[in-house]
Amino acid sequence: MVATMRVLIADDNDLVRSALRELIESDERFRVVALADSADTAVVEARKTQPDLAVVDVRMPGGGPKAVRGILEVSAGTRVLACSAYDDAFSRDEMAASGVVAYLVKGRDDVIVALQRVCGLID
């Protein structure tokens, strides 16, 4: 049996957070333990929950890069995936420099496959 991976979702859009939660929890190997609508809230939630994974929007109040750096500071074992509608080199580079392990484009990339890949559940 595979251990359940605890996930933090940080996105300023209520509908996106809800959709991501529903999608992620459709795979029994993942459980959403916290939701955040800003960089500051994401850091607070990461400190409280110590998630295995965090899915972080690139452009939200406080900024995605700030959220990633803060999450990694308070929860060093968390693997962070960027999730954005933007697929430009600047956004990708900025998030990579902040410490993300993967960059997903909303509406194009398969979130569950990315989470499974980051966790080593698939190649």
Image (tube, rainbow, N blue to C red):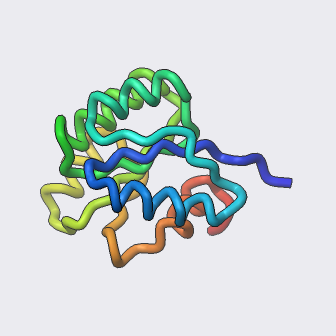
Residue lying furthest bottom in this view?
108
**Above or below, 64 relative to 19:** above
**Above or below, 84 relative to 113:** above
Where residue 35 appears, as percent x and y from the top left, is 43, 42
Q: Which residue is drawn at 46% across and 29% down?
A: 46
**Above or below, 8 relative to 70:** below
Q: In this view, does 78 lie to the left or right of 26?
A: left
Q: In this view, does 52 lie to the left or right of 35?
A: right
Quadrant housing the C terminus? bottom right
Q: In this view, does 5 lie to the left or right of 22?
A: right
Q: Residue at x 79, y 53 (%)?
A: 2
**Residue 70 in which image quadrant:** top left
**Above or below, 31 relative to 26:** above
| Number of numbered tags placed on the structure image | 0
Where residue 79 appears, as percent x and y from the top left, is 49, 42
Where residue 85 appears, as percent x and y from the top left, is 23, 67
Q: Which residue is drawn at 39% across and 55% down?
A: 17
